[in-house]
Amino acid sequence: MKTIIVYLFCLVLNVNSVRYQNVTYQPVERQLLDFKQEHPLPIGLWTKNSGEPTEIRDTVTINSDQFNNQLLLDSMLTIDGERIPERVVHARGIGAFGYFEVTNDVSKYTYAEVFNGIGKKTPLVVRFSSGSQNIGGSDLGRELRGMAIKFYTREGNLDFTCLQTPVYRYRDPIFFASAERAFKRNPQTLLFDFTAQWDLVTLRPEILHTFFWTLADYGIPNGYRRMDAFPIHTYEISNKYGERHYVRFNFRTEQGFSALTSAQAAAIQGMDPDYFNRDLYNAIDEGNFPAWKLEMDMMTPHDIQNVDYDPFDVTRLWKNGTFFTVQIGRLVLNKNAENQFRDIEQGAFNPGHLVPGILEPPEFLFRGRRMFYRDTQNYRLGRNHNKIYVNMPLYAKTYVRDGRPPTRLNMKNAPNYYPNSFNGPIPYVDEKRPREKLQVLESTAFDLEPASYFYNHILEDEAHRQRFIGNIIKSLVPATPPVVQRVLKLLHLVDRDLVRRVRVGYEAALAQAQAERPGQATPSPNLPIRNFPTAEGPPDHPPTKGAYSIRIL
């Protein structure tokens, strides 16, 4: 046994002499060597879960009394619990730490402490993710991506759950389950199913606008560092005098937005399905810290009641000329997570986590999300998920206690009920908070104008438009003919040029598929091409608005 110990000690000394000589490693490749350089000697004694030092003879269990080996029990009876349930959506992700710095005075608009005081820095954590992939999926899918941000402010945690598209799929929170299931894997084939996706889009056309964004170049940004991010909702903010504005926050990448075509993404995926994660980690470790500018598009209470569209509708953009933009500051990521499970996988981001000066959006989707996020985090992480280190606010005194760990100090011996006369935590009066409350009555009508505007104005040139059409065609080829018929009818209502080009490309793609698979029958699309109206065609801006109303209560 002494011989073995001496051999291991010599091995450690020899490996410690390894340096980066005549070879170049990426930061992700040298992580273990970096650790060894930071710790030239072993970091300490290996212990059992109870803290008892591990004796070297306990590291082998052959021909031994295994039931009396506590190390074996520690190892084997805990590995089953090593993983927590993965997120239903946005399961695959990576994160990093950084700070937010205020660069402009916005005190005339909001009294939120985090956004006031030029030069003020607030620590934060960010998690990037792909919307539909499982944990073991690919970074290169054409789908929605997330950028969830947690600001550790002195007034509590402020969470923004952003997407790389400035619009969202639906307005009614009850639609969440169906939308997510249709865009995730088929329960029998375990494949992404374009028939299901287009079937749902044609039956709920409000999805079409966001689907267009993902089918365009915006659907696959060139890594997380080069994508913009949007918290989607229209928030209410107020200043210290109670004056209100309504804003949409935008995080604009300072790296310059860059996207990948489908062909480029396919080529990268064949070589490196972890391309997004690798790119972010390497950039931060090399000191090339990614940054985003935070700005807010703004309307006054008068503006929102006089525009000809619903400014709280998350499925559409605000129209140019109806708002003004104010710069706030910069978000910078300068530190990789030391342990992704501890720091990122256990992260709980909730759009309902707001701070004084930023009030909740008045629309119904936000109300549903505020409830749903809490429920999923209770399921994944337990009811005390806000006491997990990465989720802990800088200051917290509550009447919430007990339950499954972590409980931290569990409020020690303070009174556990309110009100009480024994000096437990007390509420405060926020005299700056507006007393009036906005109520929005939303329409359930579908609006196809945003999709038409996207095709004619957001797609900036013919090359982009052609790639967008090509992606639509690729998604339609595996779809069943009845669904394709409905898709073409829907696209006809959006734009005549769009449906004409999609129809021609789809028929050509079917013919090519038949040629490549001789002897296999390709289903006839049975498209009612001549059934489309041809005299007038759809208007340039399709009939759109359902009525909505806003009231001050």
Image: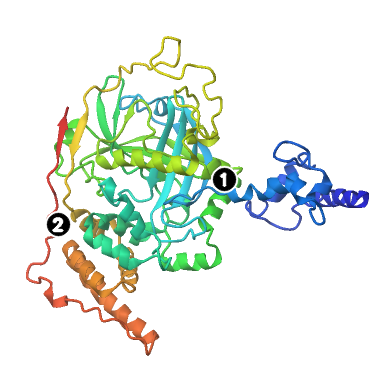
**In the rendered structure, which amino acid carries the disc numbered 1?**
Phe
Q: Is residue 36 left or right of residue 268?
A: right
Q: Is residue 444 above or below residue 246?
A: below
Q: Is residue 403 above or below residue 515?
A: above
Q: What is the x, y in percent for residue 179?
A: 31, 55
Q: Farthest residue to the bottom: give it.
A: 519
Task: Give the colour scheme of this rendering.
Answer: rainbow
Residue indicated by mark 2 = 541
Q: Earlier in the sequence, mark 2 or mark 1?
A: 1
**In the rendered structure, which amino acid carries the disc numbered 2?**
His
Q: Nearer the viewer, residue 469 or 524?
A: 524
Residue 82 seen in the current view = no
Q: What is the x, y in percent for residue 255?
A: 46, 48
Q: Is residue 232 left or right of residue 447?
A: right
Q: Within 10 angstroms of label 2, few (less than 14), some, or many (20 or more) residues?
A: some
Q: Farthest residue to the right: give it.
A: 3
Q: In 3D space, how far apart are the residues under numbered discs 2 and 1 (Cα atoms)?
A: 48 Å
User: Residue at coordinates 34% horizontally, 73% vertically from top-left?
Assistant: 478
